[in-house]
Image: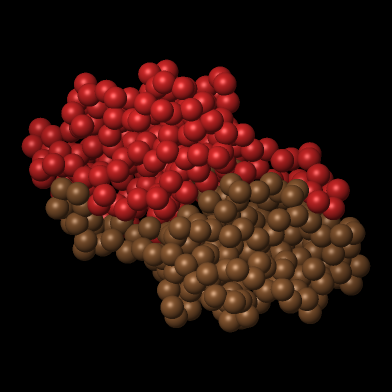
Chain colours: A red, B brown
Amino acid sequence: MRPGDDVAALLPADLASEDIVVVSHKIVSKAEGRLVRLSSVTPSAEARQLGKEDPRLAQVILDESMSIVAARDGVVICETRHGFVCANAGVDQSNVPGDDAAVLLPVDPDASARALRAGLPGRPGVIISDTFGRAWRLGQVEVAIGIAGVQPLDDWRGRADAEGRELAATVLATADAIAAASELARAKDSREPVVIVRGLGKWVTDDDGPGAAALVRARDADLFR
Amino acid sequence: MRPGDDVAALLPADLASEDIVVVSHKIVSKAEGRLVRLSSVTPSAEARQLGKEDPRLAQVILDESMSIVAARDGVVICETRHGFVCANAGVDQSNVPGDDAAVLLPVDPDASARALRAGLPGRPGVIISDTFGRAWRLGQVEVAIGIAGVQPLDDWRGRADAEGRELAATVLATADAIAAASELARAKDSREPVVIVRGLGKWVTDDDGPGAAALVRARDADLFR
């Protein structure tokens, strides 16, 4: 995948409107030219203090961050310009050729998802995913960072459970569950940047919908930021 | 499901050793008698200050917590005795008959998973799940709180990506991804407490393994506790 390449051209032609295509953000970022050459970066004093092995990478991470939520021993948890909270502001060097390039998140992953969906035959739902760690739990899961045509949340508040009791707080993070499930179908070294998810058409919407922006917990409603 | 009931008896008889059974903790808790009658609870002053509508429920939550990680406007994020960080220490009134009962998490969900697995023909992998919210992101996902015979984490550190670059930080939370995926196969009001996951036999292990305890981030390695 190179800057200017067409992600849609990678995908099978027989997609249906009930399908959901989960695409690793990395190929979207590469196609959009969201790459930085570390050799072109001059680290600031702040970057040098972040404890990263390569201060130039630290500078790129700072440039991609709205704020640093927590940092210790070289682990840097950032709030990105999109409002996502994740390690290194999503800046990543894995599955990138050479040692000099780092891949950034797309500028507007929801817009990327909408553009990809518009270019796909059958107009399936589209999720652009990234691998995020979690507070309190070890290990990482895929989450949705860009969405078009998939319900991000399934809100059961006000609906009743099987006993007829009103569900007070149940809002399922549908798109994140789909992103997490997609990872089970491949391996990290398999060069399979796309997973087609079938059987979940009930969450595919005709309009593109609110996108992954709807999954960001607002700062003033967040106990951990 | 009532105290003393056999969860294994609910499951299909044709399970295979490559299958993974994801069981909502609620039926396990009910079978284990992990129910509290609110009418039997006398709330303390601390419980009354927690901002819950029912201070007796607040008392039950305190009793189930090792510590309160954050609390505001009636939202209480607790660290349970197992080390899980979740709302209300996992105490829940949904899908429980009557208004007087609250369901607690199993005392030792990994032991519950191991016991269930031992009682199942074919010895499939077993995951006991609960619905957890997340820091920074809206909506909830199913996570694994008890595991027997499923690899909780898939550690890629030291292995190479498709470009031959060593993956520095990649540890996939396999069991949590499987739990999240299971929720996509049912609805919150469907009375379907069990999901059979097929095709993921590569993560089923012969021995019961370290369980969901392996998913708990140690307190001294946690930036958010």
Q: Please state the horizontal and vertical placement of residue B4, each as a whole percent of the image.
A: 79, 79
Residue A124 in sight: yes
Q: Is residue B105 above or below residue A167?
A: below
Residue at left 25%, top 45%? Answer: A191
Q: Is A140 left, or right, of B189 in this rendering?
A: left
Res. B72 visible in picture = no
Residue placed at 65% from the left, 42% from the top? A171
Q: Nearer the viewer, residue B204 or B222?
A: B204
Along the viewing direction, whichever of A34 and B62 lies nearer the viewer: A34
Q: Quadrant of residue B48?
A: bottom right
Q: Position of residue A195 (x, y in %)?
A: 39, 41
- Tell me the quarter of the image containing the N terminus of chain A: top left
Q: Position of residue B196 (x, y in %)?
A: 58, 60
In the rendered image, which quarter is residue B112 located in? bottom right
Q: Is residue A35 left or right of residue B223?
A: left
Q: Residue furthest front?
A: B14
Q: How many marks?
A: 0
Q: What residue is drawn where x is 27% and y is 41%?
A: A91
Report the side of B129 relative to A130 (left or right): right
Q: Residue at x 71, y 48 (%)?
A: B188
Q: Position of residue B24 (x, y in %)?
A: 66, 62
Query: In the displayed structure, would residue B126 be above or below residue A8?
Result: below
| Quarter assignment of residue B101 | bottom right
